[in-house]
Image (spheres, grey):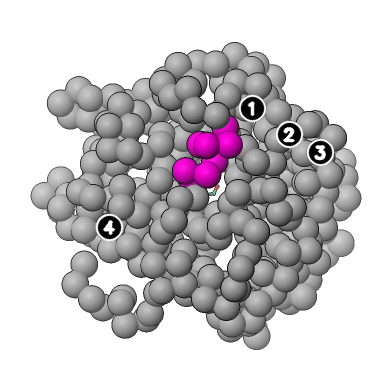
Amino acid sequence: MSSQSIETIAAAMVAEGKGILAIDESSPTIKKRFDSIGAECTEENRRAYRELLIAGDDINEFISGMILYDETIRQATGDGTPFPKLLASRGIMPGIKVDGGAKDLAGHPGEKVTEGLDGLRDRLAEYRELGAPFAKWRAVITIGDGLPSRGCITANCEALARYAALCQEAGIVPMVEPEVMLDGDHSIERCYDVCEETLRALFAALYDQRVVLEGTILKASMVLTGNKCAKRAGVEEVAERTLRCLKNSVPAALPGIVFLSGGQTPVEATAHLNAMNAMAGELPWKLSFSYSRALQAPALAAWNGDPANGKAAQAALRHRAQLNSAASLGHYKESMETAAA
Ligand code: 13P
């Protein structure tokens, strides 16, 4: 168990050229991913798949931390090494998803609020013992006709801030994730407005709850056109608007912002991150990645539920992680996609 300060942990999460791999899918979500390749969603299959992702060679060159699910942080490799111990021995921080999932928000049709504050202090103490130096809580903000409501943004940001304060009390770095969903036919301008309103409300709530920004990481959505909108914004426009939104709403004291992929293809997610870092010049915070689908998709396809494909799955993950590492430095080129994995 590390006794580093939250400021030191947060800085290490966004160390030069590194980002986060999210492997914290809840059991229903990982079942959807397994269904897509026809793999059975048993506890042993989930363990075996996560072992592949955790144990690949040299992944620590590009990955500073992995976010685990409650089941996963208690699991071990086939030869009995607990996952958090294996990760720590390779210089990768074992993070933990601690929210209880997004549930319908009463009085707000079509909107969600994330639950999980009850008992969180005790659960954080246990996760700290299990070796977790950082945690994640995801809120869901939906764009639609008249949505999001102010009530939805306020309720979610207050929960994020209370979670973050409890994390810091336990010596754990909170990753705060207000995910603005990609679903819908909204314009990129509308997405910009919702992202900015959400982030301003989030940082006001973090201030109210006395959260130390130097020991906090933001997991942010990019400013994108809705996935059902006919006219999609290009890479440069997404990068330019996302940077503008973040500069207008995220305090400079924060050490890093890591993006979720949110339904972008792996190549899109890498290209967007790269464009931001290539065009930005000096920024107050690091801009890196904390992708689940955009890092795992090629590995999941290569694995295909067959243990014989383990090495190919690990090579696919390593390649994607390497490309995103390059993107976090603004050094990615599309030609690198076809370089040998
Ligand atoms: P995606 O990158 O697949 O959006 O997942 C990131 C994540 O952790 C969502 O909470």
Mark 3 residue element? helix
Q: Residues within 10 Å of mark 2 (few under 14, many from 20)?
A: many
Distance of mark 1 from mark 2, alpha carbons? 7 Å
The amino acid sitting under disc 4 is Arg
**Tags 1 and 2 touching, CB below 8 Å:** yes
Which residue lies under the disc numbered 1? 168
Residue 108 within the magenta-colored segment of the rendering:
no
The amino acid sitting under disc 1 is Gln
**Tags 3 and 2 touching, CB below 8 Å:** yes
Outermost left residue: 308
Q: Earlier in the sequence, mark 4 or mark 2?
A: 2
Which residue lies under the disc numbered 2? 211
Q: Percent from the top left, x then y, of residue 10?
A: 54, 41
Q: Going 74% across and 61% down the picture, which residue do you hit?
A: 195
The amino acid sitting under disc 3 is Tyr
Number of marks drawn: 4
Q: Earlier in the sequence, mark 3 or mark 4?
A: 3
Q: Which residues are magenta?
A: 6-13
Distance of mark 4 from mark 2, alpha carbons? 34 Å
Distance of mark 1 from mark 3, alpha carbons? 13 Å
**Tags 1 and 3 touching, CB below 8 Å:** no
Q: Is residue 109 left or right of residue 15?
A: right
